Amino acid sequence: METKLYTPPQNKSCNLVFWFCYPAINSFALSSLGYLWLLKEVEMLEDVCVEKVATDTAKTKFMPSEVDLMAFSFSFDLDFLNILAMLDKYGIPLRASERSENHPLVFAGGPVVSANPEPYRDFFDFFIIGDGESVNIEAIELIKNNKNLPRREILKLLAQVEGVYVPTLPAVVKKSTKKLEQCIYSTILSDEAFFKDTFVIEVERGCANCCRFCLACFLNLPIRFVPIEELKRVIDLGLSHTNKIALLGAQISAHPKFHELCKYIYDKALENPEIEMNFSSLRVDAITPDVIKTLVQTGSHHTTLAIEAGSERLRKVINKNITEDQIFSAVRIAKENGLKGIKFYAMIGHPTETQEDIEKLVSLAKRLKSNFGGFDISFGISTFVPKAHTPFQWCGRDSVKSLEKKTNYLKKEFHKLGINAGISSAKWDYWQAVLSRGDGSFTQFLIDTYKLGGKTGAFKQAAKQNHIDADYFAESNRDLETPLPWDFIELTAPPKKFLKSEYSKIL
């Protein structure tokens, strides 16, 4: 059952039929904050008929031949597999150049294509680069008002909109950046959602810490905060429909009124003990008694902390400036104020990493468990993937063989300690790195990967038959003066010379 927290216009004319596609199952779509918000924004238009389409949508209201415009939310590198499958399912040619005037225009937005759309340039007529709230509506209105023009003429008009990239009309594209005067929140609640009946609230966007590997930081600068009174209003709205709320943001604790926000939620939970609340991952230096008491009062037994590396030396390299004293202090505060456990996020394969850094991660885990008996310590570990627009965009990954050796060592040592550690697949992360630094030569490689089944073996076979040097994209260090496929995207901040400066600090 789905409950909309808004009332769309009734009996409206369909001057434009719009499929808003989510490249995963519907339960995931119903838990995607950005997707749901943009769906609501389009559905509020008087003369646009929008339909939500997921990979498990059995039957659509509109026939593909009736659809004027088709959009995809593109949040994860491997989403392209389901995007191509959905185009195939509805009889739409995979390459934009092979579509006729009778096919819908197809576009995408989201962090993957905002960072580097080039591997996917031939599948889409245009892209939204950056924040989509305003530019999506502007693009849709433009298409609706000019739908009788040929496709190429519509694309010429779209190319003039800030934040729109049309691959067939190359130009410098300025990323769309929106102020956060309005709070983004879940517009649909559903017991079928992955996060069942959970009201998600965006507290802030971006991060000022600027860890040198982090796309979420550099792609979303400058950091922006929703005003506290707006947050309180939206929390009240959510709690009028459900007892489950979640606060979202890359650096929630940096909100200038964060502790006031915690107290507001804490007081609400005292009035209604059934209220449940979760944060996205917190910074170690944000752990204070009032924050933990708020979590405990709202039913949380665990929280997550991102430490990213086991040694202080490596944390300085990646600009994660937290000390071991701060880590131990955070765990002590968490335990003393009622939490049952903490899951630590870390990453292996950082530039300049040595075996000693890996061993220090194990040593840290051992001392945490020894000092905090009865407290649940666990780890989630991924491998480094270089991302566009970050200082580490010039850095190659360790080889799969090297990373698997580190992974096996960590699995063995954590098992000895009796600490649960989930570690991502070095093979899968390798292909994510290939995609994240890919270019416009990837079209047939990606099509063949999809047609071969989309597993790691399919990537390898498709790369070979299309003469794609995958190691070059994933593992090679790039020269600072070599042009990068995504250089045509102009971020709000920081300039490329700042990224070069940050990169130089690690050498």
Image: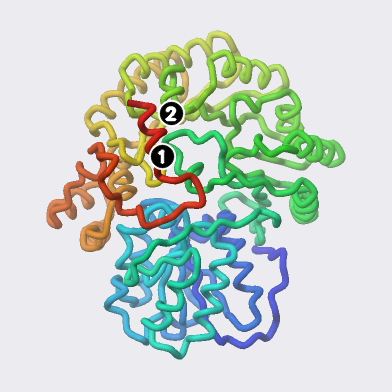
Q: Residues within 10 Å of mark 2 (few under 14, many from 20)?
A: many
Whole-percent x, y for residue 470 in the image: 20, 46
Q: Would you say residue 88 is visible in this rendering?
A: no
* Residue at x 27% of width, y 55% of height: 439
Residue tagged 1: 499
Q: Which residue is mark 2?
A: 318
Q: Earlier in the sequence, mark 1 or mark 2?
A: 2
Q: Position of residue 74 (x, y in %)?
A: 44, 58
Please state the horizontal and vertical placement of residue 246, each as a whole percent of the image: 66, 45
**Where residue 444 appears, x then y in whole percent?**
21, 63
Identify the coloring: rainbow
Q: Amino acid at mark 2?
A: Ile
Q: Judge the density around disc 1: few (<14), some (14-19), many (≥20) Cα neighbours within 10 Å.
A: some
Name the residue nearer the viewer: 155 or 112.
Answer: 155
Q: Which mark is residue 247?
A: none
Quadrant of residue 45 within the rendered picture: bottom right
**Residue lying furthest bottom in this view?**
148
Q: Is residue 238 above or below residue 362?
A: below
Residue ID at (73%, 23%): 289
Between label 1 and label 2, give the one nearer the viewer: 1
Question: Relative to 7, does residue 265 appear above or below in the rendering?
Answer: above
From the viewer's perspective, tell me whether residue 359 is left or right of residue 449: right
Task: Identify residue type, mark 1.
Answer: Leu
Q: Of 389 and 366, which appears nearest the observer?
A: 389
Locate residue 475 relative to residue 113 in the image: left or right: left
Q: Residue at x 40, y 78 (%)?
A: 156
Query: Do the residues under discs 1 and 2 have CB atoms within 8 angstroms?
Result: no
